[in-house]
Image (cartoon, grey):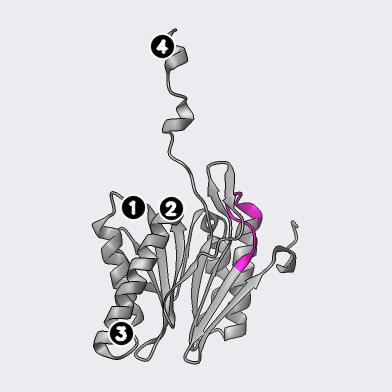
Amino acid sequence: MSEELLAEPGWLSEEVKTGTTIIAVTFDGGVVLGSDSRVSAGESVVNRVMNKLSPLHDKIYCALSGSAADAQTIAEIVNYQLDVHSIEVEDDPLVCSAATLVKNISYKYKEELSAHLIVAGWDRKEGGQVYATLSGLLTKQPFAIGGSGSFYINGFVDAEFRKNMTKTETQEFVVNALTLAMGRDGSSGGVAYVVTIDKDGTEEKCILGNELPKFFDQ
């Protein structure tokens, strides 16, 4: 049998492409996180309704992108470490502490893991905060977006974001951004998950595809 017939198909050695859309935005008194629900592996959709907003503590969440398994593993490790930390200090952890833990793990295992997490939440010291973490990077921002769908909404987010928006305005902003990304990015889709965090607690919401806003090209 010829070597050509025995050769391994090219797609077996190719990197599996993943895609998603995640966003976190601060408002006057808290933060809103959002994500789509589609998990893709190359051209295949392997999960249509995965919630990519994972709790790290009562008022701290992270938005997951990259490899689903890697991102979930980081979130579970940080969730455990924050529980231990809160018991030791007898108080709720700070958002910055959670983001630092994510950053440390991402940097330590940057060669083994493929994940990008946005950490956001509310604490008594600084209120609502958003942190972007990537391979050792840690930066505090008024908003952050990530995933393959973020390339389609950079202009929208830059143009429409305003500081000190109300909670309702921020929720609408996040849903609109997710809808636009899901409409353009083939690796993003499904339903929209939204989490709102402020001093009063956490509110989780799932918006079905037929309930998302309509835009001109739709």
Task: Tell me the amino acid under the disc marked 3.
Answer: Ser
Marks 4 and 1, the one that precedes in the sequence: 4
| CA distance for labels 3 and 2 | 28 Å
How dense is the environment of label 1, judged by Cα within 10 Å: few (below 14), some, or many (20 and up)? some
Marks 3 and 2, the one that precedes in the sequence: 2
* Magenta highlight on residue 146: no
Q: Which residue is mark 4?
A: 3
Q: Which mark is residue 67?
A: 2
Q: Which mark is residue 113?
A: 1
Circle 3 SS class: helix
Task: Tell me the amino acid under the disc marked 1.
Answer: Leu
Region rendered in magenta: 183-192
Task: Tell me the amino acid under the disc marked 4.
Answer: Glu
Residue at left offset 24%, top offset 86%: 88
**Magenta stretch: dominant SS?**
loop
Q: Which residue is mark 3?
A: 86
* Magenta highlight on residue 186: yes
| CA distance for labels 4 and 1 | 34 Å
| CA distance for labels 4 and 2 | 34 Å
Circle 2 SS class: loop
Task: Tell me the amino acid under the disc marked 2.
Answer: Ser
Residue at left offset 52%, top offset 55%: 151
| CA distance for labels 3 and 4 | 60 Å
Tell me where residue 89 sits by quadrant: bottom left
**Which residue of the protein is positioned furthest toward the top in this rendering?**
1
Marks 4 and 2, the one that precedes in the sequence: 4
State whether residue 125 is above or below residue 110. Answer: below
Q: Quadrant of the C terminus?
A: bottom right
Tell me where residue 118 sits by quadrant: bottom left
Is residue 160 in view from this perspective? Answer: no
